[in-house]
Image (cartoon, rainbow, N blue to C red):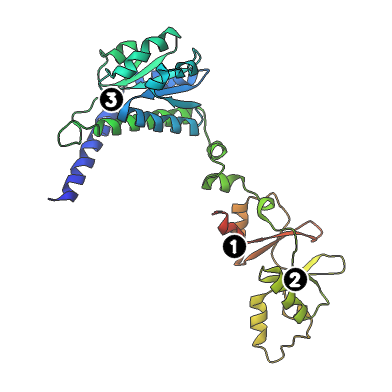
Amino acid sequence: MDYKEIAQETLNIEASALLQASKNMNDVFEKAVELILSCKGKLIVTGVGKSGLIGAKMAATFASTGTPSFFIHPTEALHGDLGMISKEDAVIAISYSGESEELSSILPHIKRFGTPIIGMTRDSNSTLGKFSDLVIDVVVEKEACPLDIAPTSSTTLTLALGDALAVCLMRAKDFKKSDFASFHPGGALGKKLFVKVSNLMRTKDLPIVGKEAKVKEAILEISHGRLGTVLVVDEQERLVALVSDGDIRRALLRDDFSLEANVLEYATKNPTTCEDENMLASEALVLIEEKKIQLLVITDKNKKIKGVLHIHTLIEKGIS
């Protein structure tokens, strides 16, 4: 049995359903978008079985892209959750046949509230079709299932049409990356757009020595500080240099190396610093990578140290 060929056939059948729906797109879809945009409440999505699973995903997509939305199961609605629907809301009801018993049971009650219904079904003359203010056609020529029974092409099309609705709403609302990140503060984009240097920089127990310190003192501070670096300051506590464990290793190769030497002899003078602790952590990472350093020192305008940001911290926190 050629499973690769079966998989390709499945994808081709479902892709064909999407392309055909694209060609058959009419003004009903546009009216559905306008109806949702005019909704003063929430967008409720409901459906049973596979349609319910698709509906739950659609509601999640709407909610995360700027359209307040949640999913209600018809059975739960019949046992109290109908109270979650108001006349200010709009409902997307999904049933391929349009005759799902559980869904059909709640439609009269939704209409009693005066709540508009957008039906997603293959049959506008079905029970769902008749109760709907607008019907988005989700008919497919055939399911990808070899028995032409299991919802495959039809669920793929329904899901894609839900995505199309969400994208249209995003465009209409001028939904931006920053808006998306607001709903996903824990995600990669949220971290990229909201986490600042001040949120991640280390401010306590910093390894610091004076510019008159000897190399052996610097090595002790490097060990205690656990940053692989010691910061060197002048009498006014202004940053003048830093010494990394790499600087020490390279210094060991010199014939004149001495633990009693002044730390500045082996230091990196005028190191890269940042005066803006409100800089995005993602921008700080770019700076660190451009300068090929591991530690970024955060200072005020007078070069007094406020904190440090290590590349390992950025990586651990998922900043990219």
On screen, 54 above or below 116? below
The residue mark sitting in front, 2 or 3, is 3
Q: Amino acid at mark 2?
A: Ala
On screen, 276 above or below 76? below
Which residue is depicted at the point 54% across and 36% down? 183
User: Few, some or many C-alpha atoms within 10 Å of disc 1 (few <14, some 14-19, many ≥20)?
Assistant: few
Q: Which residue is mark 2?
A: 241
Q: Which residue is mark 3?
A: 138
| Measured Cα–Cα span from mark 1 to mark 2 | 21 Å
| Measured Cα–Cα span from mark 1 to mark 3 | 50 Å
Which residue is depicted at the point 50% across and 21% down? 42
Residue 145 seen by the camera: yes
Say whether disc 2 or disc 3 marks the residue closer to the N-terminus: 3
Q: Which residue is mark 1?
A: 312
Which residue is depicted at the point 75% across and 63% down? 205
Residue 70 is marked as none
Label 2–label 3 contact, CB within 8 A? no
Circle 3 SS class: loop
